[in-house]
Image (spheres, rainbow, N blue to C red):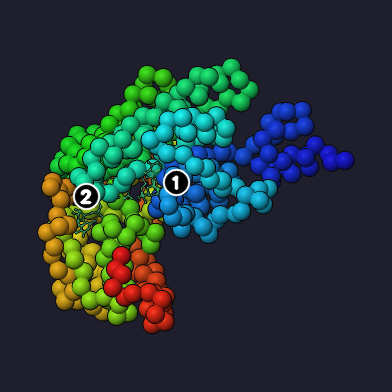
Amino acid sequence: RYPDFAKKMIANRLGERTGAAGEEVGRRKVALITGITGQDGSYLTEFLLQKGYEVHGLIRRSSNFNTQRINHIYIDPHNAHKARMKLHYADLTDASSLRRWLDTILPDEVYNLAAQSHVAVSFEIPDYTADVVATGALRLLEAVRSHAAATSSSPSRRHIRYYQAGSSEMFGSTPPPQSESSPFHPRSPYAAAKCAAHWYTVNYREAYGLFACNGILFNHESPRRGENFVTRKITRAVGRIKIGLQSKLFMGNLGARRDWGFAGDYVEAMWLMLQQERPDDYVVATEEAHTVEEFLEVAFGYVGLEWRDHVVIDKRYFRPAEVDELQGDSSKARRVLGWKPRVGFQELVRMMVDEDVELAKREKVLVDAGYMDAQQQP
Ligand code: NDP
Ligand code: GDR
């Protein structure tokens, strides 16, 4: 009943992969994201959906729902024809689950964002951190490689492009500015595991010709940042102190310098790396560094508070080995990818404080109604 162009248009709209004769028509690009429930996973999903991708996310089983950051884009699978984001249970510690979902989803692009990503916590659970961060990346690379080998002569073959979420923590004690040619000197089990994942990725590129890229991303933050990373810990406290729910904030080393950008800007760089002709590794950074103390100053100052009246230094937040100064040189990403950050430091802090003041107001309503204990600090 429909002419060919109309069939193609409908298939394209629905993201269908094959036409009546089994040929591919207007296939949407398909992305597979590990760590989709994390800060970056949520921004990358929004970014890819907006580009027309079908997005599959691997989530791990938890005793509580852990999809808060993506609930706003979730569509019940019972309305499957509308849902372009789909979630599946898997775990980076379970190789069979990774291979199974690759075989089922047939992605064009794989973004490995999953990690035990807290540096201080990695000193407490080093073995687990290495298993997820280092061996997890190896398991996923191996799943991609073996999937590609098994489907090399099949019509369902995809030339999968792989992104590895590397970190400026890998530079550790190497002095700034840090670029792609700076040596790694990791200062935590997390950073050492990220170095292993980095080299596994380079090795799979060199050994098997895999299109695999390492993004070496400097710290990036947002209102969706986990509440025990320093920026969000500060802006949550600012919101709660401003609204009268808390008065003290316990902190560790205020002298550390970080190159803080906005997560929404950084996920674009991940995608850009996979759109190039050749796979490569890129540093992504704002090239501007500030101390934790400066962050406190700007965040408290923005709502008319003096941070010194509230901050208490607590030894428990110091790390066995610290990374003193990270400031990236992202000239390669700017030149080759055409990437640059849009949100600057002051704007980032204000964005996070604004959101956390609103969140604290909502908490206050619950506290006043007796539904929440004000002492329940994040
Ligand atoms: P988050 O901590 O917010 O998210 C981590 C994600 O990994 C979550 O979805 C988490 O699931 C998932 N995860 C943890 N363990 C496993 C596992 N065993 N199997 C499957 N999934 C797992 O991190 P970010 O979004 O901030 O960072 C994304 C990636 O980028 C991480 O690899 C991080 O190390 C790296 N990175 C981050 C930077 C930053 O500044 N944000 C800078 C440089 C690198 P759950 O929700 O269930 O906990
Ligand atoms: P980082 O981020 O270790 O750089 O890793 P985090 O925000 O945890 O620490 C930044 C700096 O702040 C100091 N600090 C404190 N940190 C926390 N979390 N809590 C405190 O109370 C506190 N007081 C001072 C820290 O000592 C540190 O110097 C983040 C993670 O997202 C990694 O996954 C990612 O790879 C790197 O950024 C780039």
Residue sitting at x 28%, y 36%: 130
Q: In the rendering, at what x and y percent does residue 44 appear?
A: 46, 48
Residue 27's quadrant in the figure?
top right
Tell me which residue sits at (42%, 30%) in the image.
Answer: 95
Query: Up-down: is 320 above or below 310?
Result: above
> What mark, if any, has residue 61 been given in the picture?
1
- Of helix, strand and loop, which one carries label 1? loop
**Residue shown at the point (35%, 57%) measured from the top left:** 225
Assess mark 2: CB under 8 A from ligand 2? yes
Q: Please tell me which residue lies in front, 343 or 238.
A: 238
Q: Which residue reaches farthest front?
A: 63
**Element marked by disc 2:** helix
Q: Measure the alpha-carbon separation of dots 1 and 2.
A: 23 Å
Left or right of residue 203, residue 61 in this image? right
Instruction: State the image quarter where residue 103 is shown.
Output: top right
Residue 16, position as x, y percentages in the image: 68, 39
Q: Which residue is mark 2?
A: 120
Q: Is residue 193 above or below residue 321?
A: above
Foreground tag (1 vs 2): 1
Looking at the image, which residue is at 60% across and 54% down? 75
Note whether residue 166 is visible. Answer: yes
- Percent x, y of residue 154: 61, 20
